[in-house]
Image: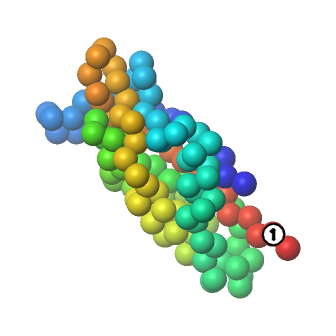
Amino acid sequence: MIKVIFKTGTLTGSSESTFVDFAEVMPSFPGGAEKLYKYLQKNINYPNIARENRIEGTVIVGFIVSQFGEILNVEAMRKIGGGCDEEAVRVISQMPKWNPGQHRNKTVAVKYSLPLKFKLID
């Protein structure tokens, strides 16, 4: 199961970047949430070390959707180990460009948190 939380935050950046707490039009994965779920399910590989040690849990990955839709500054904010953190960062880093957020008729960068649940199926 993959659960998605859309979370925004105020960030500081270069003068070329504008970050907001809330965008009137939030960034979106191409095709919407359902396509995002499918992308994650298809591309996440449960690490062997985590399988062998029966590590389960939720990795929270933070990233920025830039004003150009690029995925930037990907980091595991909450970790569970066993290679799951690195796998979550890898998959998020390789996502295709998103549709950027807009606020007051300008494209803006938005900070997201995405929890990825790793659960073994017996």
Is 99 located above or below residue 35 in the figure?
A: above
**Where does the image place residue 94, in percent across and percent down from the top left?**
41, 60
Is 33 located above or below residue 22 in the figure?
A: below
95 vs 30, nearest the viewer: 30
Residue 81 appears in the figure: no
On the image, which quarter does residue 84 sit in? bottom right
Task: Decide: few, some or many residues near mark 1? Use Cα within 10 Å; few <14, some 14-19, many ≥20.
Answer: few
94 vs 49, nearest the viewer: 94
Q: Residue at x 52, y 69 (%)?
A: 87
Residue 38 appears in the figure: yes
Q: Which residue is mark 1?
A: 121
Quadrant location of the N terminus in the rendered image: bottom right
Check disc 1 and give the amino acid type. Ile
Farthest front residue?
31
Q: Find numbered disc 1 in the image and state the secondary structure of the residue it sits on.
A: loop
**Where does the image place residue 32, in percent across and percent down from the top left?**
54, 37
Farthest left residue?
15
Q: Residue at x 68, y 63 (%)?
A: 118
Q: Does residue 75 appear left or right of residue 47 in this picture?
A: left
Quadrant location of the C terminus in the rendered image: bottom right
